Amino acid sequence: MDECIFCRIKRGDLPATVVHEDDHCLAFHDKFPRAPTHLLVIPKKHLPDLNALGEEDKALVSHIMLTIPSIARKQGLEAYRMATNIGAAAGQAVFHLHFHILGGGPLSPL
Ligand code: DGP
């Protein structure tokens, strides 16, 4: 976990443009944006991906799902896509659960 890029951002050891922080999650701009606005929302708790969630994380997930629309609204996003990759074959490169928020312009269809 010491080496996890997103844990390092969470601790302030790596710079990031943070747009939201609370007790449970952090949102910041993606370093390699693939949309005019590309944010990442992470739980502060280190979880490798969605599959790692347990019953004990119900409140955390609920909090993040309720926080994402608020973050998007504050960023002026009327339309946006939220996505999470699970596993390298699906494109996951950072193994700390994160939700991409993509918007600010037309998105290609999935
Ligand atoms: P994924 O492929 O779903 O694991 O997405 C990981 C995202 O993390 C990818 O869009 C690029 C972004 N990323 C990688 N390293 C950094 C970093 O050091 N800072 C920030 N802000 N984003 C990063």
Image (spheres, rainbow, N blue to C red):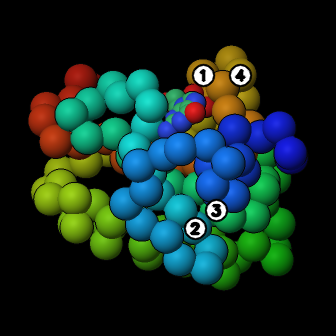
Query: Between marks 1 and 3, how big is the CA–CA gap?
Result: 19 Å
Q: Quadrant of the C terminus?
A: top left
Left or right: where 21 falls relative to 14? left
Residue 76, quarter of the rendered image = bottom left
Query: Which residue matches tag 1?
Result: 91
Above or below residue 103? Residue 42 is below
Disc 1 and disc 3 in contact, CB within 8 angstroms: no
Residue most extreme to the top: 89
Q: CA distance from mark 2 to mark 1?
A: 22 Å
Q: CA distance from mark 4 to mark 1?
A: 5 Å
Q: Find out whether the residues at labels 2 and 3 contact each other: C-beta distance under 8 Å.
A: yes
Q: Position of residue 65 (x, y in %)?
A: 48, 68
Give the number of the disc on residue 43: 3
How many marks on residues? 4
Callout 1 crowding tier (Cα within 10 Å): few <14, some 14–19, many ≥20 = few
- Counting from the top left corner in percent of width and height, residue 44 is at 68, 64
Instruction: Single out the residue that lies furthest toward the right.
Output: 1
The residue drawn where x is 62% and y is 74% is: 24
Looking at marks 4 and 3 on the same chain, the residue that comes earlier in the sequence is marked by 3
